[in-house]
Image (cartoon, rainbow, N blue to C red):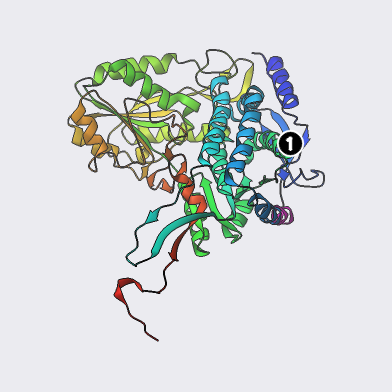
Amino acid sequence: MSVEDFSSFREQTLQKNGIKHLESGIFYGKFVEPSGKEKYTSVSPVDGHSNADFSLADRNEYDNAVRYLDSAFEKWNEITPPKRGDIIRAIGDSLKRNKTNLGALVSLEAGKTIAEGEGEIQEMIDIAYFASGLSRQLYGLTMTSERKDHRLMEIWNPIGTIGVISAFNFPSAVWSWNAFIAAVCGDTVLWKPSTKGGLVSIGVMKIISETLREMDAPQIFALVNGKGSEVGDWMAEDSRLKLISFTGSTATGKCVNQKVSERLGRTILELGGNNCAIVSRHANMEIALKGVAFGALATTGQRCTSTRRVVVDQAIYDEFLKRLKDIYENVPVGNPRQEGILVGPLIDANAVRKHTEALKTAKEQGGKIIVPGEPIKVKGLENGFYVRPALVEAKPDMEITRIETFAPILYVFKYSTLEEAINIHNSVPQGLSSSIFTENLREEEQFLSYAGSDCGIVNVNTSTAGAEIGGAFGGEKDTGSGRESGSDAWKLYMRRQTVTVNYGKDIPLSQGVRFDI
């Protein structure tokens, strides 16, 4: 695709998503007039050129958005949960109709391939439908009481307005994991996206707000594009936001957690991942190669679940590394809108710099560079941010392998026993996603036991990347706390009440306590 062709794609994508040259990045009930406000320029990593400008929220607009959502919360909870589920399902239907256009916008702004851009929107569709079904399953327990003629039970109520701070690498999907589940629970949601995904957030909000209008439903989602150091801090310190879901770096997540904890608020923290795959001599080699390659190369290594380390059994090490090297040297890198391209650009020049610096450090610490992973120029898109994926033979004592570099660098280790492999696997501060490739039942079970993977997500014979929405998503250790998306993650967006009902003619006390008056 030439520069002219990509420029044409840019204009068509913006037009089809209803985005103008200057767009409002603030929404609460309606989009706020962008003129006179600080602006941010969206730059496509594909060609390094600007897409469009959008306005950023100041403190006044932020406070207006929170007040608006508090008012919408009262109206939203006059609607029954199953009806709320119907409304969220309608949002899923609208996203489905706009999947191609929104997927193209993700490609334009985040640099994802065609399949991954549309896949992100499909995640939103899936979680909308999941949330719709969940709206009829917000179950509490009924428990036996020790007191005669008493019933003991729990009920769940919405917590109020919550805040979601999302990252550039999944500019819309991770927000929807939180927002759609919280919505059927009865909450309203304030969204602060990464400014690097600001246009996607605007495109999504246009579709969702119109659907809510068509359904005669309250505008339960608000959007405040802005600087993380400003809007993020306002949210973390704002006691009106009952929960903050933050996706980003561990360092920033710790700051967010501290500020929210000081006001005794709730957090869901999805922070750094330094994910590892173990490849056993008992693995299916073809499955392992594909699983490791996808995990390490998808989204150009810019997923929190990207495979960054692989630990290979010494019995198959040479063959596995040889075949992996061939994949890395021949994987198509380039314009993500071009058919057949598997690896697109990094998000910006700073990401390219960190990629290059990490490889330099790895070499200084004793790593052997197998595939160099140098920055490259793509014909017709010379200002884009492209690198070749890098493959490095590593040693367990290399400090750089304990650090998450958001780039397509894969460190390869050798092991002799499964216990050694697990020790290498668990030796990093992060604990998000993990994987083992084996057809040996004992190895699988050991990896799944308390003495195995210490991560929140554990995979067998599949990649560390590519989580499904039905499972609870999140990690341990420096990856953070809490869970998003499926399973019983919905409980984090609600408050539990333990209820005692006395339907008898006396008032006996628990534990046999007597209080006679």
Please tell me which residue is depicted at 30% across the width and 74% down the height of the picture: 512
Q: Main secondary structure of the magenta part?
A: helix
Q: How many marks?
A: 1
Q: Residues within 10 Å of mark 1 (few under 14, many from 20)?
A: few
Residue 45 visible in the displayed image: no
Magenta stretch in the rendered image: 58-65
Viewer-nearest residue: 389 or 172: 172
Q: Amino acid at mark 1?
A: Glu
Q: Is residue 64 magenta?
A: yes
Residue assigned mark 1: 214
Residue 350 in the figure: left or right of residue 212 = left
Residue 111: percent from the left, percent from the top? 58, 26
Please tell me which residue is depicted at 71% across the width and 29% down the height of the picture: 51
Residue 308: percent from the left, percent from the top? 38, 32
Residue 244 in the figure: left or right of residue 436 = right
Residue 443 in the figure: left or right of residue 431 = left
Judge whether 377 appears above or below 142 on screen.
above
Looking at the rendered structure, the secondary structure element under dot 1 is: helix
Residue 362: percent from the left, percent from the top? 37, 34
Judge whether 175 appears above or below 110 on screen.
below
Please tell me which residue is depicted at 44% across the width and 48% down the height of the picture: 482
* Quarter location, residue 325: top left
* Quarter location, residue 419: top left
Residue 360: percent from the left, percent from the top? 41, 33
